[in-house]
Image: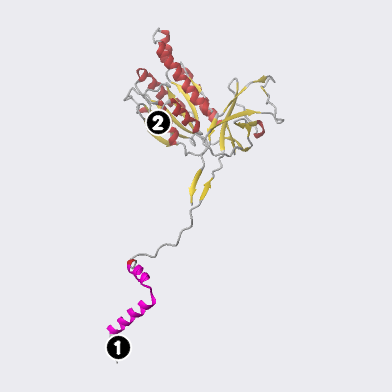
Amino acid sequence: MRANPLRKFILAVLLFTLVCPAGELALLAQNKDKQPPPPPQQTPGYSISVTVPVVTVDVVVTDNDGNYLTGLKKENFRITEDGAVQSISNFAPSDAPITIVLLLEFSKLGYEIFSANAVNWAAAFLGNLKQSDWVALETFNMRPHVEVDFTHNGREVMQGLSQLYFPPFSESNLFDALSDVLDRIKDVKGKKSVLVLASGIDTFSKSNLDQTMKRIRETDATIFTVGVGSQLFMMAESSGGGGFGENLNFIQAENQMRTFAAITGGRAWFPRFDGEIPSIMQEIAVSLRNQYSLAYSPSNAALDGKYRKIKVELVAPDGGPLTVNNQKGKKVKFQVYARQGYTAPKSSVDAN
């Protein structure tokens, strides 16, 4: 005889009720459509994520006549950071391809003479590049604009220059443009540089001079500056034009350009004649091809985000000053070009 199905169901419910407490029955009823609760979590801990920085310094050494000192060895260099001698871990003459951004002032300032000089002189630089080199073109007036992204083809950049006819604005926001280009190339590996062709005048950038200097101190790019306004100011002086205020602005503009270059180990030029341009542009390219690349891990391991001063010196094998003689055996003076410091990274604290 078959059991009544209703009787079986009632017996099962009674049995389940006797086994499970009432509180658990209520909980099961509430969570019948939910996923099981996750396993209990341990109390959160904290770990410090430490990044050990490696500081790379590109160095150029010339004598007072502008001749490059080649054949130097690792032992000929001494690097100090905030006065403390550092141990150089990597050293090599840098023969890597050039990676450079041409940053041009393209505004109506200076009766458009500034922009005309910037365009023409940038074109003169292109003849010094090799097929393996990378070059990009960026202009600025009211705001920066990338005309040609990085390319091996100098003709693309020349074509970009040929399309720069009439500047649209009278503004020249140099500080914003410098910050923009340094942000764009901050993740580019290896040696990199920026050639600034500008008057040095800034009209009303969002960034002020102090903020721009801070940004320049953070970069590992070398900045070269060529003033495009010296011709106009020379003509104004010779004709009796230009008041004290204008002359002061021009002096300040040139000093800013010099400072931008010096901080990063670059150089600045302020040509007054077009005939100076070919040798200046060649000098920039040759300088980039005669860099020594040095690297060290700072002895100060604090990740404090502070700016640290770097000094690069030439020394003899015994640690004393290095003596350099010319072909006639006469002692010559030399100049070391290297960035003046860097900003240490900050530590990061991450929760597990």
Going from N to C along the chain, the mark reached first, 1 or 2, is 1
Residue 13 visible from this viewpoint = yes
Q: How far separated are the C-alphas under marks 1 and 2? A: 90 Å
User: Depth check: 346 or 71 in front?
Assistant: 346
Which span is picked out in magenta?
A: 5-29
The disc labelled 1 sits on which kind of residue? Ala
Q: Which mark is residue 3?
A: 1
Element carrying mark 2: strand
> Which quadrant of the figure has residue 233?
top left
The disc labelled 2 sits on which kind of residue? Glu
Q: Is residue 26 above or below residue 341?
A: below
Q: Which residue is mark 2?
A: 138
The mark closer to the camera, 1 or 2, is: 1
| Quadrant occupied by the N terminus | bottom left
User: Depth check: 279 or 179 in front?
Assistant: 179
Residue farthest toward the right in the current orientation of the protein: 318
> Where does the image place residue 249, in percent across and percent down from the top left?
42, 16
User: Depth check: 291 or 343 in front?
Assistant: 343
Q: How is the image coloured?
A: secondary structure
Q: Is residue 6 above or below residue 286?
A: below
Label 1 crowd (10 A; few <14 / some 14-19 / many >=20): few
Residue 121 visible from this viewpoint = no
